[in-house]
Structures are given as C-alpha cells and as structure tokens.
Image (cartoon, rainbow, N blue to C red):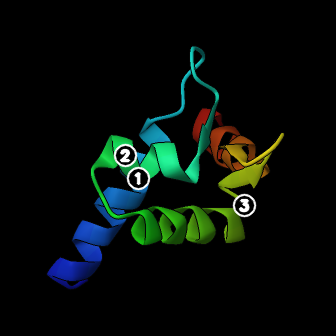
Amino acid sequence: MSEKADSSLVRLLAVLDLFSDLRPSWSAEAIAEALQVSLPTGYRYVKVLAESGLLQRSAGSQYALGPRIIVLDHYIRK
C-alpha cells in the first residue's frame, strides 16, 4: 500500500473513532471540523464510509455508524 493510501486509511478510521455512546451521530461539517480537514474532504470521507456501509445517514444531516460495523463486530467476536 502506498504512503498516501496509508494516510487516507488512517484518516477514514479517525472518522469512525469519533463515534461514541456520548455522541453517536455527527454531521459531515462536524467531522471535518473535528479532524481539521476541509469541508469537501469531510464530505468525501462520509461518502466513502457510507457507500461501504460503515456509516449511514440518520435524522437530518447526521450520520451514525452503519450496519457493516455490526457485521465486523460479529467477525471479531467469533
């Protein structure tokens, strides 16, 4: 994997790390701000993660962890 791909993966994982019991949903704008990236970059991260099922759109312009997280959790716990 190239260095650029490595850093992109790290940043996508950083998006997932934002979600917690205390804050289960985020807007793309809040994600961009929290990760200190541009708004278009924040939207790109959300789009990639939503397309993969790791995020899903919830109420309003919010995103929550998606159903693919449950599948991955199931594999980990086996």
Whichever of callouts 3 and 1 sits on the residue coming sooner in the sequence is 1
Q: Position of residue 18 (x, y in %)?
A: 45, 35
On-image quarter of the N terminus: bottom left
Q: In the picture shown, does residue 4 fall above or below 65?
A: below
Give the crowd class for mark 3: few <14, some 14-19, many >=20 residues within 10 Å: some
Residue 2 vertical placement versus 48 (above, below)? below
Q: Between marks 3 and 1, how big is the CA–CA gap?
A: 19 Å
Q: Please tell me which of labels 2 and 3 falls first in the chain.
A: 2
Dot 1: element: helix
Question: In this figure, which residue is indicated by the disc labeled 2?
Answer: 33
Q: Position of residue 50 (x, y in %)?
A: 68, 63
Residue plotted at (80% across, 44% down): 60
Residue for point 59% across, 39% down: 26
Q: Label 1 vs label 2: CA separation? A: 4 Å
Q: Look at label 3 and name its amino acid.
A: Gly
Instruction: Look at the numbered discs 3 and 1 and tell me whether their residues touch, using CB distance below 8 Å.
Output: no
Q: Position of residue 46 (x, y in %)?
A: 57, 61
42 lies above or below 58: below
Label 3 sits on a secondary structure element that is loop
Q: Position of residue 49 (x, y in %)?
A: 59, 63
Taking the spot 41% from the left edge, 53% from the top edge, the residue there is 32
- Does 11 sit left or right of 71 as displayed? left
Kindly identify which residue carries mark 3. 53
Q: Decide: marks 2, 3 in contact (CB < 8 A)?
A: no
Residue 32 is marked as 1
Drawn side of residue 77 relative to residue 35, left or right = right
CB of mark 1 within 8 Å of CB of mark 2?
yes
Q: Amino acid at mark 1?
A: Ala
Q: Could you say whether the residue bearing mark 2 is in a helix, strand or loop? A: helix
Side (left or right) of 64 relative to 3: right
Residue type, label 2: Glu
